[in-house]
Amino acid sequence: MKFFFRIFFKTLRLVLTPFMLLWEKMTTPKGVVRQPEVQQRIDQQCKNMAIYQFKTCPFCIKVRRELARLSLSIPLLDAQHDSQNKEALLQGGGRVQVPCLRIMDEQGKTVWIYESSEIIKYLHEHFA
């Protein structure tokens, strides 16, 4: 029975993946247009951040759409297929859960934010 459920959900995931990615591409909003010097300053701040994600996770899609809306160039790290990213997420954040925003400050202190709503809230507070 366990085998049947595993095969069923793998097949379902394979069937739905292209539709989810197409839906994301079609519905991604246009980004905010800022003055070049303001955008450059924001891009500099984004270099100290990274988002650990799975390509087809609905919550990750939600965060990626918000990144596009806010015109943020935060690197996206695949924690599903890249074992180094998965291990870094586990070692740094304490658990393999996506999406996860990693923020490093100037002193080298790292903050890990889980939950898509918390990540979006942080992004709006600092970049909207």
Image: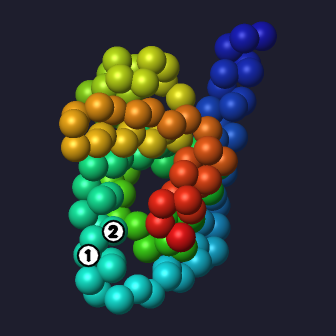
Identify the residue under disc 2: 42
Spatial separation of the CA atoms under disc 1 and disc 2? 5 Å
Residue at position x 59%, y 54% in the image:
120
Residue 75 visible in rendering: yes
Given residues 47 and 26, the one toward you in this image is 47
Q: Is residue 24 left or right of residue 5?
A: left
Q: Please state the horizontal and vertical placement of residue 22, each as a whole percent of the image.
A: 58, 67
Identify the residue under disc 1: 40
Residue at position x 33%, y 68% in the image:
42
**Callout 2 amino acid:** Ile
Q: Is residue 93 left or right of residue 122?
A: left
Q: Residue 53 carries which label?
A: none
Q: Residue 102 is drawn in which quadrant?
A: top left
Given residues 50 and 53, the one toward you in this image is 50
Q: Residue 37 is drawn in which quadrant?
A: bottom left
Q: Please state the horizontal and vertical placement of residue 60, each as a whole percent of the image.
A: 56, 49
Q: Please state the horizontal and vertical placement of residue 40, each as a whole percent of the image.
A: 26, 75
At mark 1, the secondary structure is: helix
Q: Are marks 1 and 2 in contact (CB under 8 Å)?
A: yes
Q: Please state the horizontal and vertical placement of residue 126, each as a whole percent of the image.
A: 48, 60
Badge 2 local density, few (<14 within 10 Å), some, or many (20+)? Answer: some
55 over 81 or under it: above or below = below
Badge 1 local density, few (<14 within 10 Å), some, or many (20+)? Answer: few
The number of numbered badges drawn on the structure is 2
